[in-house]
Amino acid sequence: MKTYRLEFTQKLPIDLDTAWDFFSSPLNLAEITPKDMTFDVTSPNMANTKMYPGLIITYKVSPLFGIKLGWVTEITHVKDQEYFIDEQRFGPFAFWHHQHHFEKIDGGVLMHDTLHYSIGWGPIGPIANALIVKNKINEIFKFRYQKVEELFGKFK
């Protein structure tokens, strides 16, 4: 099974407390996800929840063609104000491991994401990834980049 790696970085003109507070709240995921994906956190009692190891988050999401899918992730690792890792337990990918890192820099925070994923699907998988999946993931992170700039401003 072929595994892919993508990396994304963004500098934020906010302090580390603000960045961590926003990105460690599961409910903020919907705000930084493209609206056409109809991303809904379905886990109960998430209003005041912050990331912690073992946290299970359930979602409904339409990643492609408007087809609504269930997705379950687990937050497997957290180091306060440094990083957290989410891993898919059930959902559209054969494998999903997403690291979210935050580092204080002059004038703000450097946010760095490393995503490892596999879509499975045997010999069709690499073709589907090249034609659809990789592009969709890049679109999602491009949207997130723009939305985060809209929310917090551009880094100068």
Image (tube, rainbow, N blue to C red):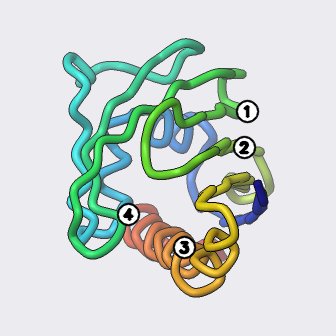
Q: Are marks 4 and 3 in contact (CB under 8 Å)?
A: no
Say whether disc 4 or disc 1 marks the residue closer to the N-terminus: 1
* Eye-nearest disc, 4 or 3: 3
**Circle number at residue 82:** 1
Residue 51 pos. (x, y %): 50, 23
Say whether disc 2 or disc 1 marks the residue closer to the N-terminus: 1
Residue 78 pos. (x, y %): 66, 22
**Circle number at residue 133:** 3
Say whether disc 1 or disc 3 marks the residue closer to the N-terminus: 1
Amino acid type at circle 4 is Leu
Q: Are marks 2 and 1 in contact (CB under 8 Å)?
A: yes
Say whether disc 3 or disc 2 marks the residue closer to the N-terminus: 2
The residue under label 4 is 151
The residue under label 2 is 101
Which of the two residues, 67 or 37, is positioned nearer the viewer here? 67
* Eye-nearest disc, 3 or 2: 3
Q: Quadrant of the N terminus?
A: bottom right
* Figure check: 9 above or below 17: below
Amino acid type at circle 1 is Glu
Q: Secondary structure at mark 1?
A: loop
Q: What residue do we see at 34% from left, 44% from top?
A: 28
